[in-house]
Amino acid sequence: MFIRSKSLKGALAVVIASLLWGTTGTAASFSPNVSSLAIGAFAMGVGGLLLVLTNINELLIHYGKILMHRKLFAVGALSVAIYSLAFYSSMRLSGVAIGTIVSIATAPIFAALLERLFSQKLISKQWGVSFTLGVIGVILLTKGKEYAVDGTSNLHLNILGIILGCIAGLTYACYSWVARSFIEKGVDSRAALSGLFGGAAFLLLPSLWLTGENLFLNITNSVVSLYMAIVPMFLGYLLFSYGLKFIEASNATLITLIEPLIATILAVLLLGESFKLIGWLGAFLVFLCLFIQTIKPNISFNFNKLRFNKYI
């Protein structure tokens, strides 16, 4: 019962983080004259520095363990940096809804593969059912978007945006897996994520000399830039790091399927992006996916021995 309570707390923390992340695309759209590369670099870079400052004590305690695995740390920090640039560029090219959907929907696939290939994690039957519903849901969301009939949609840019979304999904799964690997090696979750984000900030912030000229051009740009760095990035990832203490990376990335749902709703209500009935059916399936993942008990499936074990 105690284990289930901790898992529920971890899942709830990831849900709240996902709600905050779901606002990023809509917020960024209010600064169209700011490069998507600049938005990604500033939001993740400043957010990473804030995470480092907030968790400096944990980092000082655990930095030795982190440095013992320099290559793993380098992969994680680089993944964070690439993710932020690919994610915001995907939304700028393909639209907030599709960019977010593709980026987040592909992450659980990559996360499960990473855990299976490198960590030998068991695949949960519950995860499989929930994942299937989630994938169908996000596909229907994508198919359900209505495009302009006057030819203003650029197919090539849309395809490029989808490719960047897939890259974002892969790198998102990578740094989630790296963070979880550090936690399993005895590193505090806050130290693990803040360390990775601090490393990414070291890579991202210098790029603002080339791309960030409009970040603080006016009040709107300033408010959007600060909001992106402080609320979704800093506060969101504090919650996410807490959640990773109690649930697997594959489960965490699956729960974050709520992010494209929130992003879609905001895009429709505030940005005028429209969807057909099939798109809203997809939204329902994403909710059902989230419900199954957070409520039902985990059942793990051993591929080698075809044996089921229930964890209570």
Image (spheres, grey):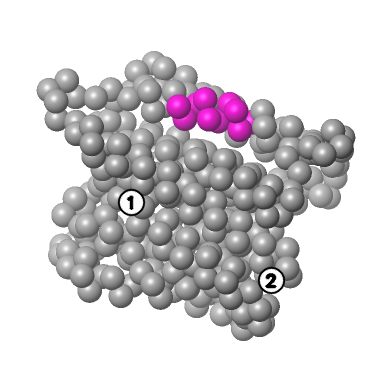
Q: Position of residue 157 (x, y in %)?
A: 23, 39
Above or below residue 13? Residue 183 is below
Please state if 294 lies on the left or on the right of 304 as rendered. Answer: left
Q: Position of residue 201 (x, y in %)?
A: 41, 71
What span is in magenta?
A: 130-139
Residue linked to disc 1: 88
In the picture, the quarter occupied by the C terminus is top right
Q: Residue at 63% across / 44% down in the picture?
A: 112
Judging depth in this view, the residue of 22 and 187 nearest the camera is 187
Please state if 1 lies on the left or on the right of 171 as rendered. Answer: right
Kind of residue indicated by mark 1: Tyr
Judging depth in this view, the residue of 208 and 294 nearest the camera is 208
Residue linked to disc 2: 187
Q: Residue at 71% across / 54% down in the picture?
A: 119
**CB-based contact (under 8 Å), mark 2 and mark 1:** no
Judging depth in this view, the residue of 268 and 308 nearest the camera is 308
Q: Position of residue 42 (x, y in %)?
A: 33, 65
Above or below residue 271? Residue 142 is above
